[in-house]
Amino acid sequence: MKTETINGVTYKLPNVLNDFQKDLYVHLINWKWKNITKEPGKYSDDYYDAILPESVHKNFPVIYPDILQDLKLHQNKFPFKLHEHFNHMASSQAANVNLFLPVLLNTKANDVLKNINSNSKIIKSDFNKLANNELYKGFRIEFWDGNSSKEKGILKDHNARSGTDSDIAIAYYNHDNELCLWLIEHKLTEKEFTECGGYKSKGRDEKKHLCGKPYNDVLKDKNLCYYHDIRKFKYWDITDTNKSFFANADKYDECPFRGGMNQLWRNQLLGLAIENDINQPYKHVYFSVVKHPGNTSLDQSINEYMALINNNPKFSVFDSTDVLNAAQSVNDTTLNKWIKWYKGLYKI
C-alpha cells in the first residue's frame, strides 16, 4: 500500500496501478466517500480506501438497490461465491451484476439485448427473446454446468475453491426458436485475463509437463500438460474434439494457453462442451468478453485470441458503453435511472 496525494487529496492505493486503473480507482474512492463511507477497508495487513469496511458489507452498498432482492433470490437457487474482492469498489463481479441484472430483469430486456451494437456490428444478431423460464429468470451469475461443490462439471475442473465459469450466462431463443446460451466474461480494471495455474503449480514436473512444446505436440501427447496428466481436466480432450475452432493454434511453437488466453480458452471450451453434450438443452453456445471502455490492457490478449480462432463468430467483444447505449435506445424510465447511476459509479 502507498499513500498518494492527487489534486490535494491523499489516497491509500495499491503500489502498482497503470494510468487507467489509478484514474478509475480515485473516482471510485471519491464515489465511496460521498455515497457510502470514508472508512477504509482492510486487506492483508494494510488499509485501502478502495475497499469497503466490514461494517457495511451486509448492506451490499455497491450493488444497484433495485436488483438486490433478485440477486439474493438468485444466490439461493444457484449458490455462487462472492469473490474475495467483492467488497472492493473496483470489483468486476459487482460491476458485472450492476451492468446486466437491471437489463435482464426489465420488461424491455429483449429490445435491449437485440440492440447491443459494437463497432456497427450487432453482437447478438441471432437473439429473438430471453428464455425467462431457464436458469434464474433467463440468466445465471457465475455460470457453470453444475450446482454443487460435489460436482466436477463438464470440464472436470470444479471443486469447492476453483473451476471454470462465466461471469454471467444468458439463455435465449434464436429466430429459429432454438434454445441458446450466451456466456459472458466481464472485466473492469484487470490488466490481464487469468493465466494458466497449471504452469505455475508446485505439482508440475518440469521435466515431464513441457509447456514449451508446440500446440500440436500437446494434442498428440496430452500428458505433456499438468492439467491433463495430474488433474485430469478435460481441456485438451475438448480442444482435440474441436480442433477446427482453434484454426491457427498450430502456428504456435509453445502452448498458446499459458498467458492471458488461458481464461478465454477455458470459457470457450465450456461453451463448446455444453453445445456438444446431448444432455444439455442448448443448441448453440456463444462466448463474449465485455469490458470497461477505458481498459485497453486486455486488447493484446483479445486480439491474439481472435487471430488464433480465425475470428470465429462464436466469440465476440464489446464494452459496457454498448450495453448502456442499447438500454438508452429503448427510452425506459426505469432503465434511464439505472444508466445514470451506472455511469456515475463507473465513470463512463
Image (cartoon, grey):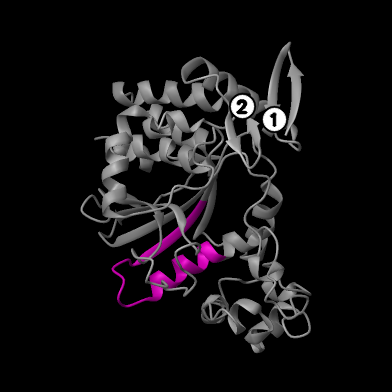
What residue do we see at 38% from left, 34% from top? Answer: 58
What residue do we see at 66% from left, 88% from top? Answer: 221
Q: Residues within 10 Å of mark 2 (few under 14, many from 20)?
A: many
Q: Is residue 6 left or right of residue 293?
A: right
Q: Is residue 208 above or below residue 85?
A: below
For the view shown, which residue lies furthest in the bottom direction?
Answer: 221
- 118 or 203, which is in the foreground? 203
Amino acid type at mark 2: Asp
Residue 81 seen in render: yes
What residue range appears in magenta? Answer: 266-288
Image spot of residue 190 (x, y percent): 63, 44
What residue do we see at 69% from left, 58% from top? Answer: 304
Identify the residue under disc 2: 49
113 part of magenta stretch? no
Amino acid type at mark 1: Leu
Instruction: Tell me the element at label 1.
Output: strand
- As measured in the structure, the alpha-carbon distance from the residue carrying label 1 to the one carrying label 2 is 7 Å
Which image quarter: residue 143?
Answer: bottom left
Identify the residue under disc 1: 13
Image spot of residue 289 (x, y percent): 53, 50
Determine whether label 1 and label 2 are within 8 Å by CB.
Answer: yes
Q: Is residue 310 left or right of residue 18?
A: left
Instruction: Tell me the element at label 2.
Output: loop
For the view shown, which residue lies furthest in the top direction?
Answer: 8
Q: Residues within 10 Å of mark 1 (few under 14, many from 20)?
A: many
Q: Is residue 310 above or below residue 242?
A: above
